[in-house]
Amino acid sequence: MSVQLTVSLVVYGFDEGVLSDTLTSLRQAIRIARDDGVLDGANISLVDNADHADTLEPLLRQCMHGIGDAVQVDVISGHGNIGFGQAHNLVIHRGDSEYHLILNPDVIVDAQALSAGIRYLQETPGAVAASPAIVDGQGQPESGCKRYPSVFDFMLRGFAPSWLRQRFRRRLQHYEMRDLTSDRIQADVPIISGCFMLFRHDALRQLGGFDPRYFLYFEDFDLSIRARTVGHLSYLPQMCITHLGGNSAKKGLHHILMFGRSAYRFFSSHGWRWL
């Protein structure tokens, strides 16, 4: 049976150099997964939520040059800024690939990541999605898996001064699942990060993809909780990425307000936990 992968990246404002590095790393990871015999072909879609098609199309083809006819690429544009989850849904709802990768345009994919992730899903029928080990741009471990949050956790993590966060360090480490180790798979994770989600495509379509009511933020939390109704989410330390993204609390008032609206929707849907 031919094993296919679809990949969706949503682009709004972006750094061309970083996106080029992301796509180049993705090309290498796809090539190794094919060489390892776990993947036959892939379709990579850049979903343009702004008006960058003239830049994105040649960049995508340049970064994927030489990978072969088994990898198809396209840019989806002209729909305006419909939000993160809704934009990914444009790709999720089409095609019939075995696996689908939700990928941020500021993630560097380790060369072995897709090979490790696809092989794990092939060998683990109960797993619906896998989450990687993550480091930031300075090589420091980043939290990609989380336990169910409280409002207090978010206030501490996003807005508290460093001295106060330090006082609640153990609490935040528990929420961020800092107890996960680099040598052990965790086969039942509550929430995984939307910067890199490797899903079984049929399960993702069964769930309806992302809830389009989330314009930005918390769509990955919501999808994670719904995904656990059809299988388990796994932390896979052999699957590694570097995430160059930033903290939402440092992106200005507009983003903070969007964060607050999405948080209200999430807790209203899945249950309030204040402390």
Image (tube, rainbow, N blue to C red):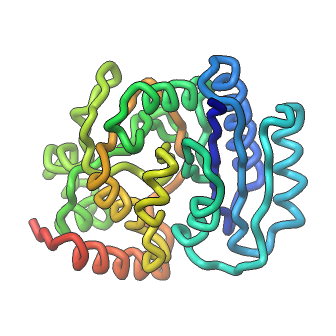
Q: Residue furthest left?
A: 275
Count of labels shown? 0
Q: Using residue 197 as the reference point, say whether residue 104 is left or right of it.
A: right
Give the image location of residue 160, x and y in percent.
Answer: 26, 64
The quarter of the picture where the N terminus appears is top right
Q: At 44% from the left edge and 80% from the top edge, which residue is drawn?
A: 213
Q: At 71% from the left edge and 79% from the top edge, which residue is drawn?
A: 79
Q: Is residue 84 visible?
A: yes
Q: At 72% from the left edge and 27% from the top edge, which residue is drawn?
A: 31
Q: Nearer the viewer, residue 136 or 231?
A: 231
Q: Nearer the viewer, residue 215 or 208?
A: 208
Q: Using residue 48 as the reference point, say whether residue 132 is left or right of it.
A: left
Q: Using residue 110 as the reference point, say whether residue 53 is left or right of it.
A: right
Q: Is residue 166 visible?
A: no
Give the image location of residue 14, x and y in percent.
Answer: 70, 61
Q: Nearer the viewer, residue 145 or 202?
A: 202
Compared to 136, does 105 lie above or below? below
Q: Using residue 238 as the reference point, say whether residue 146 is left or right of it.
A: left
Give the image location of residue 126, x and y in percent.
Answer: 32, 37
The quarter of the picture where the C terminus appears is bottom left
Compared to 187, does 229 lie above or below? below
Q: Quadrant of residue 141?
A: top left
Compared to 231, does 14 lie above or below? below
Q: At 39% from the left edge and 31% from the top edge, which residue is drawn?
A: 236
Q: Nearer the viewer, residue 182 or 158?
A: 182
Compared to 97, does 69 lie above or below? above
